[in-house]
Amino acid sequence: MTLPVENVQTYPRPPLLEPVPHMVTVRLGGAEIVRTTRALRVCETHHAPTYYIPFADILAERSEAAGGSFCEWKGRARYWTLRAGGVEAKRCGWDYPSPTPRFAALADHMAIYAQAMEACTVGGLPVTPQTGDFYGGWVTENLEGIVKGGPGTMGW
């Protein structure tokens, strides 16, 4: 199954939460730490989709990292450090331990910053991290439109 062409400017606000019917993989420290068809994704206007992976499908050592953040849609997030193959990726993922009712399905799922990993794929397509140091979207070649995160795009 190939990924359909999608324009990020047509994603809704408030964001959409949906299951991902494609294989999602993540590599860290030379090891495949994720291979799942049970991921969820959040799609929001001008964002690359953010993929949330069930904790049970993450084959890496993890520890809670300092700090947190708040999303108006999903609630309070906590951050995680992952270790695999002798590599430690600090504060490379986050979850919502008590998500808002609209995003309740995100409980027990973690999103991972693609830039902190060796490689990530969705449906066999390589992932490029969303530009900037705040957003965690995964950009794939099937996406069209302007993805926010770069200089001058934070306020819209």
Image: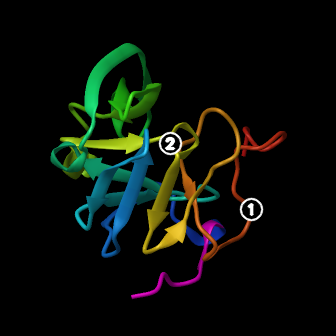
Above or below for 61 versus 24? above
Q: Which residue is mark 1?
A: 146
- At x 43%, y 42%, the residue is 28
The furthest residue to the bottom: 1
The span shown in magenta is: 1-8
Q: CA distance from mark 1 to mark 2?
A: 24 Å
Above or below for 84 versus 106? above
Helix, strand or loop at label 2? It is: loop
The furthest residue to the top: 66
- At x 25%, y 68%, the residue is 37
Indicate which label's residue lies in the foreground, 1 or 2. Answer: 2
Query: Is 77 on the left or on the right of 90, as rendered?
Result: left
Q: Which quadrant would residue 20 be assigned to in this image?
A: bottom left
Above or below for 21 versus 85? below
Amino acid type at circle 1 is Ile
Q: Pick the residue in front: 89 or 141.
A: 89
Amino acid type at circle 2 is Met
Residue 8 picture location, percent across and down: 62, 67
Residue 127 picture location, percent across and down: 56, 60
Helix, strand or loop at label 1? It is: loop
Does the magenta portion include 6?
A: yes
Residue 1 picture location, percent across and down: 39, 88
Query: Is 56 on the left or on the right of 84, as rendered?
Result: left
Q: Which quadrant would residue 101 be assigned to in this image?
A: top left
Q: Which residue is mark 2?
A: 117
Q: Earlier in the sequence, mark 1 or mark 2?
A: 2
